[in-house]
């Protein structure tokens, strides 16, 4: 049972994303939202699987992603919460 593999023999593209693919994904999500990640690649005219689109959006393209070092305040918050919670979460 289970779902068949979503790439490979289905002819879906694997590997690095192109600028054109990034633009298609960003444009589609800005206009329509992401909705169903499984349906999105076909609707956005991308030859990728839904999981690949979701990960690309979440980890690289989402506008509110903060990159770089933690601020001093964030660093203190992390240390304080680690003191309280440990490695539990």
Image: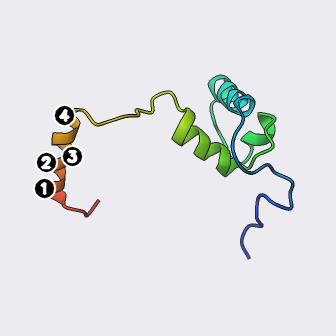
Q: Quadrant of the N terminus?
A: bottom right
The reply to whether the C-beta atoms of the residues labelled 2 and 3 are less than 8 Å apart is yes
Which corner quadrant of the image does residue 39 belong to?
top right
Tell me the element at label 4: helix
| SS assignment at label 1 | helix
Cα separation, mark 1 vs mark 3, equals 9 Å
Q: Label 2 crowding class (10 Å Cα cut-off): few <14, some 14-19, many 20+?
A: few
Residue at image coords 86%, 57%: 10
Q: Residue at 77% of width from left, 67% of height from top?
A: 4
Horizontal and vertical percent position of residue 88: 25, 64
Residue that mark 1 sits on = 83
- Residue at left offset 13%, top offset 56%: 84
Q: Nearer the viewer, residue 49 or 66?
A: 66
Tell me, for residue 78, which label it has, or none. Answer: 3
- Left or right: residue 88 compared with residue 11: left
Callout 3 secondary element = helix
Taking the image as shown, residue 13 lies to the left or right of residue 58, namely right
Whether pointer 2 and pointer 1 mark residues with C-beta atoms closer than 8 Å, the reply is: yes
Mark 2 to mark 1 CA distance (whole Å): 5 Å
Where residue 80 is drawn, which disc sits there?
Answer: 2
Examine the rendered structure and indicate whether residue 47 appears above or below residue 32: below
Is residue 51 placed above or below 1 in the rendered structure? Answer: above
The label on residue 72 is 4
């Amino acid at each position: 049972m289970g779902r068949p593999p979503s790439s490979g023999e289905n002819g879906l593209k694997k590997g690095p994303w192109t600028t054109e693919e990034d633009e298609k994904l960003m444009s589609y999500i800005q206009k329509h939202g992401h909705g169903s990640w499984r349906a999105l690649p076909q609707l956005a005219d991308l030859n990728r699987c839904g999981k690949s689109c979701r990960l690309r959006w979440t980890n690289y393209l989402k506008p509110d992603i903060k990159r770089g070092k933690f601020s001093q305040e964030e660093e203190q918050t992390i240390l304080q919460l680690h003191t309280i919670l440990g490695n539990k979460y």
